Image: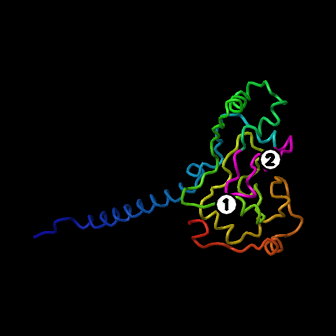
Amino acid sequence: MGALFPPWTNTVSRFSLVCLAGAIGGLFLWLYLWSRSPWYTLQQDPVDQPVQFDHRHHVADDGIDCRYCHTTVETAASAGIPATSVCMSCHAQIWNKSALLGIVRASYFGDRPIPWNRVDRLPDFVYFNHSIHVNKGIGCVSCHGRIDQMAQVTKQESLMMGWCLDCHRDPEPNLRPREYITSMTWKPERNLGPELAVAYGLHTRTSCTTCHR
């Protein structure tokens, strides 16, 4: 009795298996790369806000410190979202009739918060404390980028676990004196990392319970 399939079908079968394995491997590789791309992490994607708040004007032109609006960044886990009364401390006198500030005035006089849209968001299973990072010498610009150059705030970094761990393993390159925490333009004249790490009692933190509690 002759062979059920001709010899050339063996080559086709092997080639098909190689293609199938390559397709599966390619799919996993594509998913891996896509999950780290700006399309997934939403980096550089401007976030619309109910009020056209231009950080370039407030930070770069007017020199308003981050902590004037984000009042709890040094003392609490959350940096804090400014109450409308903070906005009106200036805009009750400046541009107090501008149509662009209609939502701000309505919020203030109606005693209702402005529904700002979050730019940087971590999963619920991740614990992050702003005050710890700030008091250990990590500047705002390290995570949030050059806010003073953004008309609309965008997510600057991926905030993925690997990105956080890179700093947790070797934080010294990102350290700065606490008095320059909110500076967008500060540059070290020399390598201050090692001495700041000692001064601030900083240690590498890579255990799972550091962020997953």
- Amino acid type, label 2: Tyr
- Going from N to C along the chain, the mark reached first, 2 or 1, is 2
Furthest residue to the left? 1
Q: Residue 37 carries which label?
A: none
Magenta highlight range: 59-81
Inter-mark Cα distance, 2 to 1: 19 Å
Q: Is residue 130 left or right of residue 9?
A: right
The foreground one among 140 and 106 is 106
Q: Is residue 100 left or right of residue 18?
A: right
Q: Is residue 74 magenta?
A: yes
Q: Is residue 202 left or right of residue 115?
A: right
Principal SS element in the magenta part?
Answer: loop
Q: Residue at x 64, y 67 (%)?
A: 165
- Return the residue at label 1: 129
Furthest residue to the right? 189
- Kind of element beneath mark 1: loop
Which part of the image, by quadrant, shows the N terminus?
Answer: bottom left
Q: Which residue is drawn at 84% across and 70% down?
A: 192
Where is residue 184? Give x, y as percent. Answer: 81, 52
Which part of the image, by quadrant, shows the C terminus?
Answer: bottom right
Where is residue 161? Give x, y as percent. Answer: 59, 63
- Return the residue at label 2: 68
- Kind of element beneath mark 2: helix
Q: Which residue is drawn at 74% across and 29% down?
A: 101
- Amino acid type, label 1: Asn
